Image (spheres, rainbow, N blue to C red):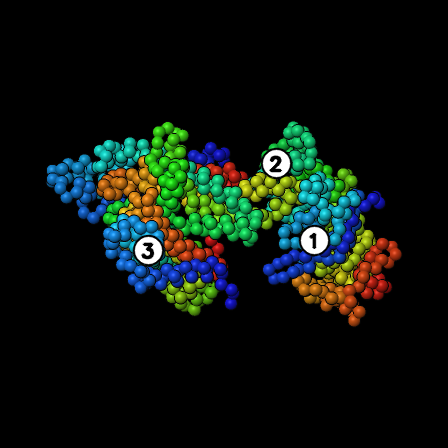
């Protein structure tokens, strides 16, 4: 057994802490994240409110913790659609090849021409702002990157002896593709998935900040930062702390991605 | 084939892409649930207004006629009128696109200016403390959302230190660049992290190449070896990467412009979403895709210049 | 011909690797006189290329070099970086096995010659261009003026090797270190390049150290030869001495692997020696070797080989580190 890469351990520790917060925010949080407290408006960080309070006297620490639930949910849900669709199509395109593969190539060329965020924003604009529409928009575009990655792996594997052996033994295409090729082609996908979760959190919070993702009063880091942006001259803590959480979460996922790439020997 | 011919060929090659971009933009607006016109006009429009706008936009025609009309208008530079601004979309974009392109170009310069020297320091000191420090800082940069970096820069350099304006665009070229500096830095940070990662890896690979040993055996100075022999080869793959990330850079510009109130196409796009100004969104999506395909072309040309083997 | 240009004493190279320390070269003595061609032969991994690169400190940061490399009175291993740069290329130049990887793919051949002239001369631009044309002409590249603008990938394999020689010789070095200069080439071109190198050596009065695993190349071109095994020089002498009457069991075995070569082929009328491959593998260098490194593969090995034999001169300048030296000659 090889020693676990340091980035993997660091990333896993960050994610573990965030998961605890996300699963039980009300246990960890000192205050009710949505309770107004007019006696303590815009309080700087102190013993009572470690991260300070916002313009309604809400505790920033509690709100940041509450938001972790939504943001980790974004990381999971915004990548799940692309992962599943991309895996199916990548496997299909790589395995079948021919015209399908050529059409797929054209599609990839087209999709990379559009700025990803612009396309997602445009789709969200059509569907209407909100989290579930954001998931749909990301799935419409994001699967292409998974499919492209898997296709390349499948193309290589398809040529290898063990696949030929499976054919000789009379295995069906579905069985060969799912039981024999997919497990061997999965490593880059898993690594990319982790990195993509970091991107998804950044994207989700960016859309939240612009008012196109999670809608207030849902506590989401991007939304919290947008809330505080009008006060940044007098109350920097409203934006600072949710942002630190956001950076940590992104860091956690990308460190796990790097560590896994190292552990699974995936070149990027 | 000479280089001019190559440019012409590449320009021809992006034509089909342009057509497909048009199809995507066309389909996008047709995806709207319900009738686009009543969507645009909101709930209070009269039937007569709706019918007039429908006819004006050609929506009473069959879908393929609508597409051909759309293409014909697009070729003529006519993308319809903005519902919110009551001016031709083309004029709106023509006013705002240069702002965004300037921002993106400035950000690219800053990103490269940061990444190249730091990638060198990192690679030359591979697996020692300067390398670890630089990589750690860039790792954090890579995980920091642009709007957050932007707000932090605003808080520190605009609000507290008052070195830079809080936002806007100013008057005259010098003032423009002054106003765009902080937004460009915010936009450049994660981009430079991407460049630095890739460049560091290629420098490390090139440093072990035998032509570097040959250059050393000729008695060349370390500076010439690094700049002439190593950097140029390492840049080849990095230039491709820079080109591929132009899309995310323009996406990032949308966010940066909103944070810093820069009057570019990004801010226009976000405003248009809330104004339900679909003609603008459609045209902008298309315009940005065209800009990206042109930067792909530019990347190809730079690559040809850097790598004589690619010019074949 | 007697003045010694290069004197190497007790050269040792160790590499620090992730799996520990590797003793790639140890105890190497070597001398090169003006104008002569010295061959350095051995199997791959015998330390010949590492020795060659250690001479001008071209090894990477994980290498530790010790011993002395005396170049015209100065110890190269102790020189400051700027003084070393003045020797590299100007006095001691080097050419590599694979010109495709040793030439920078993005710089024209002219540029790669020019930078050498800039580093080591005071010629103006026009003068450097004249010199570059002269160099291409000298190595036998036709229509030199156009070829200067060409990039390495636009040359054929043999021409690339010629171009690399032109670059290396730009500053008229007194010693050329050639690392397997013909190995990557087609057989017919190998011969042309070797002849070119020999002619240049004679014409320019330039000494050469030729690293190769090809005994035929050594026999054809070298004045003297050093045979290396497991990081050490095991036999040294003139080509006639070493190839005609090998005094080391390894050299003997090596010569027997060559058809139409080897000791017995000298005997008129005798049946040609059969091709005898050497059994076994060279030893690993990441642990100390006690005794003679060749002993485990040697047909002449005896109990005394557990102690490493010293280099012994037979009185005619033919040295070998083998207990079976006299027995080998007697056969």
- Of residues B46 and C178, the one nearer the viewer is B46
- The Cα–Cα distance between marks 3 and 1, rounded to whole angstroms, is 62 Å
Q: Residue at x 13, y 42 (%)?
A: B44
Residue at horizontal 35 percent and vertical 54 percent from the top:
A46
Given the current orientation, which residue lies at the most extreme bottom position? C303
How far across and down, in percent of the image, does residue C170 sit? Answer: 69, 37
Disc with the residue nearer the chain's start (1 vs 2):
1
A97, A119: nearer the viewer: A119
**Up/down of A235 relative to B75, above or below:** below
User: What secondary structure is found at the residue carrying circle 2?
Assistant: helix
The residue that mark 3 highlights is A49
Q: Which residue is mark 2?
A: C111
C305 in relation to B214, above or below: below
Query: Is the residue marked by circle 2 packed among few (<14), some (14-19), or many (20+) residues within 10 Å?
Result: some
Res. C45 visible in picture: yes
Q: Position of residue C190 (x, y in %)?
A: 69, 47
Q: Callout 3 environment at 10 Å: few (<14), some (14 to 19), or many (20+)?
A: some
The percent coordinates of residue B46 (x first, y second) are 11, 39
Label 2 and label 3 in one chain: no
- Label annotation for residue C65: 1
Res A73 seen here = no
Residue B50 is drawn in which quadrant? top left
Q: Chain of mark 2?
A: C
Q: Answer whether labels 2 and 3 touch (C-beta < 8 Å).
A: no
Please give the name of the residue rendered at 88% of the width and 56% of the height, measured from the top-left corner: C315
For marks 1 and 2, give the CA distance. Answer: 32 Å
The foreground one among B95 and A234 is A234
What subunit carries mark 1?
A: C
Q: In this view of the protein, which residue sits in the foreground, A138 or B268?
A: B268
């Amino acid at each position: 057994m090889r020693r676990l890469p340091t980035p993997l351990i660091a990333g896993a520790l960050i994610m573990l802490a965030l998961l605890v917060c996300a699963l039980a925010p009300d246990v960890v949080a000192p205050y009710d994240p949505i309770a107004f407290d007019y006696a303590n408006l815009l309080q700087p960080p102190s013993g009572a409110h470690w991260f300070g309070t916002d313009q309604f006297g809400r505790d920033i620490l509690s709100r940041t913790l509450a938001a972790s639930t939504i943001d980790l949910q974004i990381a999971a849900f915004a990548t799940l659609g692309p992962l599943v669709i991309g895996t199916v199509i990548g496997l299909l395109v790589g395995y079948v090849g021919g015209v399908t593969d050529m059409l797929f190539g054209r599609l990839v060329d087209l999709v990379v021409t559009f700025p990803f965020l612009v396309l997602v924003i445009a789709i969200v604009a059509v569907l209407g702002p909100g989290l579930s529409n954001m998931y749909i928009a990301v799935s419409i575009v994001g699967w292409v990157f998974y499919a492209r990655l898997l296709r390349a792996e499948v193309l290589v594997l398809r040529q290898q002896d063990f696949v030929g052996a499976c054919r000789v033994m009379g295995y069906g295409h579905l069985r060969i593709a799912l039981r024999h090729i997919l497990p061997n082609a999965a490593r880059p996908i898993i690594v990319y998935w982790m990195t993509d979760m970091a991107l998804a959190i950044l994207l989700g919070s960016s859309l939240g900040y612009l008012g196109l993702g999670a809608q207030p009063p849902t506590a989401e880091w991007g939304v919290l930062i947008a809330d505080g942006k009008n006060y940044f001259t007098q109350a920097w803590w409203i934006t600072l702390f949710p942002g630190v959480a956001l950076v940590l979460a992104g860091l956690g996922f990308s460190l796990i991605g790097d560590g896994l790439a190292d552990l699974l020997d995936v070149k990027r | 084939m000479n280089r001019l011919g190559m440019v012409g060929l590449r320009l021809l090659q992006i034509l089909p892409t342009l057509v497909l971009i048009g199809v995507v933009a066309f389909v996008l607006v047709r995806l709207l649930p319900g009738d686009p016109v009543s969507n645009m006009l909101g709930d209070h429009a009269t039937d007569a207004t709706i019918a007039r706008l429908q006819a004006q936009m050609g929506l009473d025609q069959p879908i393929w006629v609508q597409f051909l009309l759309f293409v014909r208008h697009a070729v003529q530079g006519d993308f319809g009128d903005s519902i919110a601004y009551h001016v031709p979309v083309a004029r709106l974009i023509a006013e705002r696109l240069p702002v965004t392109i300037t921002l993106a170009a400035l950000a690219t310069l800053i990103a490269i200016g940061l990444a190249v020297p730091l990638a060198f320091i990192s690679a030359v000191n591979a697996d020692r403390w300067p390398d670890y420090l630089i990589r750690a800082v860039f790792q954090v940069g890579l995980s920091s959302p642009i709007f957050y970096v932007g707000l932090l820069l605003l808080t520190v350099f605009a609000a507290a230190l008052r070195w830079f304006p809080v936002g806007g665009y100013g008057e005259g070229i010098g003032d423009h660049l002054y106003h765009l500096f902080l937004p460009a830095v915010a936009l450049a940070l994660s981009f430079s992290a991407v460049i630095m990662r890739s460049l560091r890896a290629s420098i490390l690979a090139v440093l072990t190449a035998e032509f570097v040993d040959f250059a050393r055996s000729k008695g060349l100075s370390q500076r010439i070896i690094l700049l002439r022999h190593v950097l140029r080869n390492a840049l080849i793959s990095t230039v491709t990467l820079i080109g591929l990330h132009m899309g995310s850079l323009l996406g990032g510009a949308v966010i940066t412009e909103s944070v810093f109130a820069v009057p570019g196409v990004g801010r226009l796009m976000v405003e248009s979403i809330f104004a339900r100004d679909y003609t603008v969104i459609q045209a902008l999506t298309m315009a940005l895709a065209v800009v990206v395909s042109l930067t792909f072309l530019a990347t190809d040309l730079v690559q040809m210049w850097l790598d004589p083997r690619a010019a074949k | 011909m007697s003045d010694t240009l290069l004197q190497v004493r007790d050269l040792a190279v160790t590499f620090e690797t992730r799996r520990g320390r590797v003793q790639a070269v140890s105890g190497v003595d070597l001398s090169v006189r003006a104008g002569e061609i010295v061959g350095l032969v051995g199997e791959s991994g015998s330390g010949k290329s590492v020795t060659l690169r250690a001479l001008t400190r071209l090894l990477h940061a994980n290498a530790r070099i010790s011993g002395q490399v005396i170049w015209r009175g100065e110890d190269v291993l102790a020189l400051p970086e700027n003084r070393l740069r003045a020797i590299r290329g100007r006095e001691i130049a080097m050419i590599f096995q694979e010109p495709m990887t040793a030439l920078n793919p993005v710089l024209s051949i002219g540029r790669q010659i020019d930078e050498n002239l800039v580093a080591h001369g005071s010629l103006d631009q026009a003068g450097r261009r004249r010199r570059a044309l002269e160099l291409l002409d000298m190595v036998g590249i036709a229509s030199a003026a156009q070829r200067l603008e060409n990039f390495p990938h636009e040359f054929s394999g043999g021409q690339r090797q010629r171009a690399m020689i032109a670059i290396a010789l730009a500053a008229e070095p007194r010693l050329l270190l050639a690392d397997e200069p013909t190995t990557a080439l087609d057989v017919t071109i190998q011969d042309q390049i070797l002849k070119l190198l020999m002619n240049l050596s004679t014409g320019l009065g330039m000494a050469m150290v030729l690293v190769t695993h090809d005994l035929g190349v050594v026999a054809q071109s070298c004045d003297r030869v050093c045979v290396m095994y497991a990081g050490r020089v095991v036999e040294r002498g003139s080509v006639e001495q070493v190839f005609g009457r090998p005094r080391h069991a390894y050299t003997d075995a090596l010569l027997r692997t060559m058809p139409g070569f080897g000791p017995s082929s000298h005997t008129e009328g005798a049946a040609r020696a059969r091709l005898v491959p050497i059994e076994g593998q060279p030893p690993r260098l990441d642990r100390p070797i006690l005794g003679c490194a060749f002993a485990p593969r040697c047909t002449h090995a005896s109990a005394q080989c557990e102690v490493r034999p010293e280099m012994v001169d037979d009185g005619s300048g033919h040295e070998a580190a083998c207990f079976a030296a006299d027995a080998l000659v007697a056969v």
